[in-house]
Amino acid sequence: MLYSIVCQDVEGSLEARMAARPPHLARLEALHAAGRLVIAGPNPAIDSEAPGEAGFSGSVIIAEFDSHEDAQKWADADPFVIAGVYESAEVKPFKQTLP
C-alpha cells in the first residue's frame, strides 16, 4: 500500500538539513531503485524553487510499504529525524487517484 510521509522541519533547520542530506537521499534512492517511491521532495520555506538561506519548512514522501508500521519505522529512521531536522513525520495511508 502507498503511504504519505509529511514532515515538518524545526525552525532554523537548513544547516542540519544540508549535513544530513546525502544519507537521506541515499534512502530515497534505494526506495526508487526498488520501484517503491512515487514522489519525494522538500517544501521551500518561501515561494521559490531555490529558497537559499530561507531553507525549507518540511518534506513530502509518497512510497509503497507493506504496512503502516513499516512506513512509520522507515520514517523514524530517516537521517533528517536522527539529525533533528524534522520536528514531526506524520505517516498516513495514501490512495493514488491520479495520474
Image (cartoon, grey):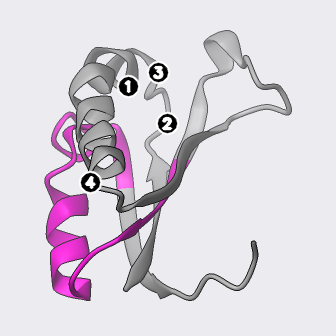
CA gap, disc 3 and disc 2 = 9 Å
Mark identifier at residue 63: none
| Residue pictured at 62% horizontal, 82% vertical | 96
- Image x and y of residue 98, in percent: 75, 77
Q: In the image, what residue type sits under mark 1?
A: Arg
Q: What residue sits right under mark 1 in the picture?
A: 17
Q: Find residue 49 and report its image quarter.
A: top right
Which of pointers 2 and 1 indicates the residue nearer the eye?
Answer: 1
Q: What element carries label 1?
A: helix
CA gap, disc 1 and disc 3 = 5 Å
Which of pointers 3 and 2 indicates the residue nearer the eye?
Answer: 3
CA gap, disc 3 and disc 4 = 29 Å
Q: Are marks 4 and 2 in contact (CB under 8 Å)?
A: no
Q: Would you say residue 18 sits in the magenta stretch?
A: no
Q: What residue sits right under mark 4 in the picture?
A: 34
| Residue pictured at 33% horizontal, 43% vertical | 28
Q: Is mark 4 on a helix, strand or loop?
A: loop
- Image x and y of residue 73, in percent: 14, 69
Q: Are marks 3 and 4 in contact (CB under 8 Å)?
A: no
Q: Give the magenta range.
A: 59-87
| Residue pictured at 23% horizontal, 41% vertical | 27
Q: Are marks 1 and 3 in contact (CB under 8 Å)?
A: yes
In this picture, is 84 found above or below 49? below
In this picture, is 15 found above or below 90? above
Q: In the image, what residue type sits under mark 4?
A: Ala
- Image x and y of residue 87, in percent: 37, 52
Q: In the image, what residue type sits under mark 3?
A: Leu
CA gap, disc 4 and disc 2 = 33 Å
Q: In the image, what residue type sits under mark 2?
A: Glu
* Mark 3 or 4, nearer chain start: 3
